[in-house]
Amino acid sequence: MIRFWAPYGLSTSSPRSLPGSGCGVRGLLVPRSLRHRYHCLGRALRAFRFYPWRVAPRLSISLAAYILGLFMVTNAGKLNAQNNFGLVIHGGAGDGVHPEALGDRSEIYYQTLKEVTDFGYEMLEKGFSSRDVVEAVIRKLEDNPLFNAGRGSVVNKNGEVYHDASIMLGSNRNAGAVAGIFVAKNPIQAALAVMENTPHVFLSDKGAEEFVLQSGVPLMNHEDSVWYKNFTEQKRVSKKGTVGCVALDRNGDLAAGTSTGGMDNKFPGRIGDSPVVGAGTWADNRTCAVSATGHGEYFIRSAAAHSVSAAMLLGDMDVQSACGHALQEVAALGGKGGLIAIDAQGNFAWDFNTVGMFRAVRTHDYRATLVGLGEEVAVYTH
Ligand code: ASP
């Protein structure tokens, strides 16, 4: 007879029982009082025709199926996301951002946006995290004088450059930001260092610069900046765009980052939306990652980037409708600009109420890199 429960079996026949103390089971001693209880339990189970050893295999199969089902339901977004990683980037929004206005310069923008997007996509494909990709992509854009960030930043009323940047992770909503600095070669690295090496989210001005100087982040060679060149040639930096990147990695984690020299001719000390978590940047694995560009004051006043996520979380909107909703809020206050976003399933969205926005996207779903300046989008197939 097969026994389901070894101690019960021992109570009916105990060939190895030890006199006076109970019986031995694989080295265990079972006292007489317990032996009696197991015996009674066995009789009771049989009386009710309940044979656990018969139903156990069926029960365990059902239990395993239930656990698997539960795992699949709770991780549906994640499983899907692993197959649909991708990124969206922007290089600023404005009324001068369209091929006719840019003329011959359009081509260099198309090429640059495509190259940077493909670079980020290949990192994601190799398994790099969205955090690494956002940092690396923004670093590339900051190094490119075509954009208003890092090297190419515009100047304030006093002719000085001040960088603002932020980064946020969707997995734990950890974030880092800097404002009013001109010491880091790549302000996005300074923002990342704040997130990872301090107990704070946001450092500004002198304190932020002191932190950068001690943090090991590569420092800016001022002579390498467009500001320095223009300063020595007595020229003003022309209007250009802030940069941003949102990404979903193979692990299902979202991240967002934004970097800028701020509004051209801004007041000294002015801080825009780009380094303000919730206004210019937001990431939450439950919803999406967002980066904004445009007239920062309006994006701060409407908490634009967070508003996209909130519309998805609380209003059950899809990512494109949520961007539209957030931009309407900006527009209702009189603001102009744009937003890019990617959701936890890899659906991407962008919206702008300016004539154009430098932007590009590549996701695993699309076998192409899409690049837009004005309304039209160029499709580069792979
Ligand atoms: N949003 C940036 C700021 O207000 C500027 C821009 O995106 O062009 O600082």
Image (tube, grey):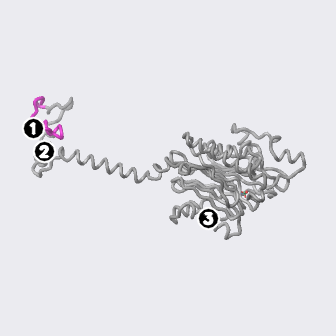
| Three-letter code, disc 3 | Ala
Q: Earlier in the sequence, mark 1 or mark 2?
A: 1
Give the labeled residue for mark 1: 12
Q: Quadrant of residue 23?
A: top left
- Per the model, the C-alpha gap separating discs 1 and 2 is 10 Å
User: Which residue occupies the foreground of this view, 281 or 360?
Assistant: 360
> What's the mark number on residue 245?
none
Residue depth check, mark 3 versus mark 2: number of the one nearer the observer: 3
Q: Earlier in the sequence, mark 3 or mark 1?
A: 1
Contact (Cβ within 8 Å) of mark 1 with mark 2: yes
Q: Is mark 3 within 8 Å of ligand 1?
A: no
Residue under the image location 77 percent in, 57 percent down = 263
Q: Which residues are magenta?
A: 1-20
Give the labeled residue for mark 3: 326
> What's the mark number on residue 42?
2
Residue under the image location 66 percent in, 52 percent down = 244
- Per the model, the C-alpha gap separating discs 3 and 2 is 67 Å
In the rendered image, residue 66, in percent from the top left (x then y), is placed at 32, 51
In the rendered image, residue 71, in percent from the top left (x then y), is placed at 39, 50
| Three-letter code, disc 2 | Gly
